[in-house]
Amino acid sequence: MSEDLKTKKIILFDGICTLCNNFIVFIAKNDKKDIFRFLPLQNKNINQFINTKNINIKDLKSIVLIEDKNPKYKSNAAIEILINLNKIFLLCTVFYIIPRIIRDMIYNLIAKNRYKIFGRVENCSILKSKMNSEILKKKIISDS
């Protein structure tokens, strides 16, 4: 297992979702402390990785943040990711005032319609873009 899998916070995301890809590029551009690593759900080694963590398989249609052995799903994952980026995003803690059931209901509505609204790509687009590849160099967990 690579050292990154042991020491970094891992974000599992839908690699064919345009919205998800754009969110990952945003995170990578703003991850000045080099906190995160990314793993598309379409990665050929995803099941092997999931088996080593305490991840609920049914929630793999959502973004998942893995830190230590405490995965966070859906809105909790998105909020925690933003909070970790920089001090400006600490303001996102205000979203915790909204009950998780309501936040996740909104998250699920967007997630259910994400392909219709934002589109999809054949492959993880952040891996194909030269600019994004430079930004994400060493941040994407390889398929090997």
Image: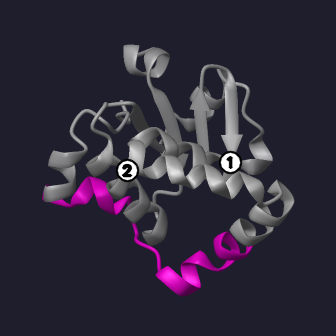
Q: Determine crowd level at label 1: few under 14, some 14-19, many 20+ residues with C-alpha closer than 10 A.
A: some
Tell me whether circle 2 and circle 1 mark residues in contact (CB < 8 Å).
no
Magenta residue span:
109-130
Taking the spot 24% from the left edge, 59% from the top edge, the residue there is: 128
Taking the spot 34% from the left edge, 34% from the top edge, the residue there is: 142
Instruction: Return the residue at label 1.
Output: 76
Q: Amino acid at mark 1?
A: Asn
Instruction: Return the residue at label 2.
Output: 27
Residue 44 rendering spot, x and y as whole percentages: 49, 40
Identify the main secondary structure in magenta: helix
- In what quadrant of the picture does the C terminus appear? top left
Residue 64 lies in what quarter of the image?
top right
Taking the spot 31% from the left edge, 36% from the top edge, the residue there is: 139
Q: SS of the residue at dot 2? A: helix
Q: Nearer the viewer, residue 115 or 46?
A: 115
Residue 5 rendering spot, x and y as whole percentages: 46, 21
Residue 69 lies in what quarter of the image?
top right
Left or right of 95 on screen, residue 135: left
Residue 122 rendering spot, x and y as whole percentages: 40, 69
Q: Amino acid at mark 2?
A: Ile
Q: Is residue 121 magenta?
A: yes
Q: Determine crowd level at label 2: few under 14, some 14-19, many 20+ residues with C-alpha closer than 10 A.
A: many
Mark yes or no: residue 74 visible.
Answer: no
Left or right of 34 on screen, residue 97: right
